[in-house]
Image (cartoon, rainbow, N blue to C red):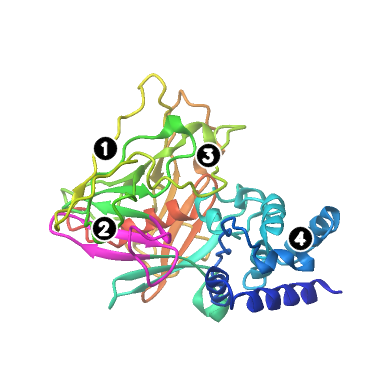
Amino acid sequence: MPLRGIIREMSEIREGSGNSSRKVREGVQMRHLGKSHIVPEQPSSSSPVPIEQSRWANLPPELLLDIIQRVEASETSWPSRRDVVTCASVCRSWRIVTKEVVRTPEQCGWITFPISLKQPGPRDTPIQCFIKRERATSTFRLYLGLSPALSGNLSKLLLTAKRIRRAMSTDFIVSLVPDDFSRASNHYIGKLRSNFLGTKFSIYDSQPPHDPKLRTSRSKRRIHLKQVSPSKTPTNYKVAAVAYELNVLRTRGPRRMRCTMHSIPVAAVEEGGTAPTPTEFKDCINEHHPSTPICKGKKPITESPTESPDPQESIAPLVLKNKAPRWHEQLQCWCLNFKGRVTVASVKNFQLVAAAETSQNVSAAEQERVILQFGKIGKDIFTMDYRYPLSAFQAFAICLSSFDTKPACE
């Protein structure tokens, strides 16, 4: 039977079993929407789930491995790569083998599962994305693809952010789906928070850093008791900081910025270095608050920051700076070589490179390599290209900082 026929039959099995399992039905609906979600594992019970009794769950391990390897190698782009996610949704045995076969974006350059958005990008060729801004709803959507004109309806939605203005700051809540921005939801990925002037930003991740030595502190934030169960306290981990230089003299030119990646050591860009690569989402909701008291009323709960790691055990973080543009005499403007990916001049356009000290073993070629570039190509349309050691979430959060108002930096 051809591979596509196998995938089609597995889809029919999932649809048929969905009538008796609510979770499986939700997974099928998300698969039809093109999201890279897989069906959650079913809890053990006395009566086995019908989908586990299908003939596909009892395939010999060698044959199962060969099938998934063929599907993974043949479907290299979205939406056809949805078949790989379908393989992981058949049953537990298929899920385990698929997770072993599918490689990280750093290794293959492809985004498959939601955890791929937290993993570093490829080292050589950047992953090309674009961002659509919707002014009416204050939302920003990150798509996988060259541009809306070239990708059309085949663009893969990766992340969505919603801007929430507060009295003293601005928050960008990042979610996996475009219609759920609750911080107590499983779709919550992280957030970006600015100061009052919009010159300093903090990036918070819903997951702790992969390396415990890179953990800094958790954010103080207030959560209404109606938003989250008392036994589930969401946690934010600060993983990066973005700072824009003040333009006191009001000189012309692009914004100047520096990004301190607390969750990525500077050794990641050194020769032979590696970046932290998470392999799964951790259930850290109740990690630091195992017993939250239940109280009545509408008073919010304030989280306390955790202790910072021992300074002797801390690791020097990676620092990124924007690449200095050159003044073009004929065009009378500041210019950067975006290699055709940016077509509209804007103060938001930037390229980030590693800012290494002389004592650090970072080659000159590595310091000139563009790790993240962001620029405008049309009204409310921007391109975002990122590579190792940044992840899609980290790159998206850095680009979101460019959308906030910065009167003191321009």
The answer to the question of whether label 1 and label 4 lie on touching residues, with beta carbons closer than 8 A, is no
The answer to the question of whether label 4 and label 2 lie on touching residues, with beta carbons closer than 8 A, is no
Q: Which of the marked residues, 1 or 2, is nearer the chain's N terminus?
A: 2
Rendered view: 7 above or below 261: below
The answer to the question of whether label 3 and label 2 lie on touching residues, with beta carbons closer than 8 A, is no
Check the picture and name the quadrant holding the C terminus: bottom left
Asked which secondary structure carries label 4, the reply is helix
Q: How far, Cα to Cα, is label 3 from label 2?
A: 26 Å
In the foreground, 264 or 146: 264
Q: Which of the marked residues, 1 or 3, is nearer the chain's N terminus?
A: 3
Mark 3 residue type: Pro
What is the crowding at mark 2: few (fewer than 14 residues within 10 Å), some, or many (at least 20)? many
Tag of residue 276: 3
Mark 4 residue type: Ile
* Pointer 4 residue: 68
The span picked out in magenta is 161-189
Check the picture and name the quadrant holding the N terminus: bottom right
Most extreme residue toward the top, as rendered? 312
Q: How far, Cα to Cα, is label 1 from label 2?
A: 19 Å
* Pointer 2 residue: 171
